[in-house]
Amino acid sequence: MNAPDSSTVRLGQNLANVRERIASAAARSGRPPEAIRLVGVTKYASIEVTRALVQAGLGDLGESRPQALWDKATALADLPVCWHLVGHLQRNKVRRTLPLVSLVHSIDSRRLLAAVEQELSLAAEAGGPTSGKPLAALLEVNISGEAAKHGFAPAEIEPLLAELPKLQHVRICGLMAMAALEGGSDRARRDFAALRELRDHLRPLAPAGVSLDELSMGMSDDFEVAIEEGSTIVRVGSALFEGVVDS
Ligand SMILES: *Cc1c(COP(=O)(O)O)cnc(C)c1O
């Protein structure tokens, strides 16, 4: 079944609106709109509404919970979707998640990084579907320092960099963060600027094969600020689903 027509229309409008806002913010930061990748976070949407969003033209989708990603990726396997895991990945969910995703935004501990590398190495030996090119991933940084947030402390990233070339199956290509929950857009801007400054400081120190080009930052309430501060990937959920009736 398809989502109701009015919802399909509204999704298309929301998508166009978000893309326009991305383009304006990109222009303010002196970049072309293509420099920013939009990932639609579908955790609030049913499978049918998610399907309609892909049909409206969005090919990058994200989920914060591995289980929800499995369900949607399975149900929408007939569509050309690049899946992004944007939330915490429990180590016991690594095996089932990795074959489904094109980018993991949320490598938030050394233990998880080691588990992902080990799983991909086993899969490569077995000649499984994930063997072949390395999995792209981002290091999640707890830039706001809030106790409830996952992620590496900013100071942990530099010592970690030297170890990354040992990984044969995971290719780190940038950093991800969320702004503080409280404090509005001024605080968000400071948090995003702090992530970009950390990245700018670390980039010359990155060993061969490790790039810190990508900055995954910005959600519905703050993606324009994030782009102004250098974001290359925004993870937008609720703004895409405003006014969409989901049953
Ligand atoms: C839910 C979620 C988003 C999207 O949030 P919105 O405010 O709905 O845009 C982005 N990133 C992560 C990690 C999320 O969990």
Image: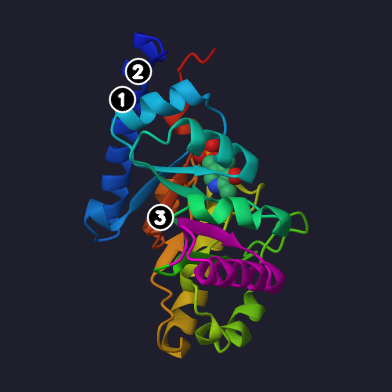
Residue kind at label 1, given as amino acid type: Gly
**Mark seen at residue 233:** 3
Report the side of 7 relative to 116 (left or right): left
Q: Residues within 10 Å of mark 3 (few under 14, many from 20)?
A: many
Toward the viewer: 81 or 194?
81
Q: Pointer 3 and pointer 1: residues touching (CB < 8 Å)?
A: no
Q: Secondary structure at mark 2?
A: helix
Percent x, y for residue 112?
67, 67
The mark nearer the N terminus, 2 or 3, is 2
The residues bearing labels 3 and 1 have C-alpha atoms spaced at a distance of: 20 Å
Report the side of 36 relative to 202 (left or right): left
- The colour mode here is rainbow
**Bounds of the magenta span?**
103-131
Report the side of 241 relative to 179 (left or right): left
**Mark seen at residue 12:** 1
Q: Is residue 245 visible?
A: yes
In the picture, which quadrant includes the C terminus?
top right
Q: Is residue 152 visible?
A: no
Residue 111 within the magenta-colored segment of the rendering: yes
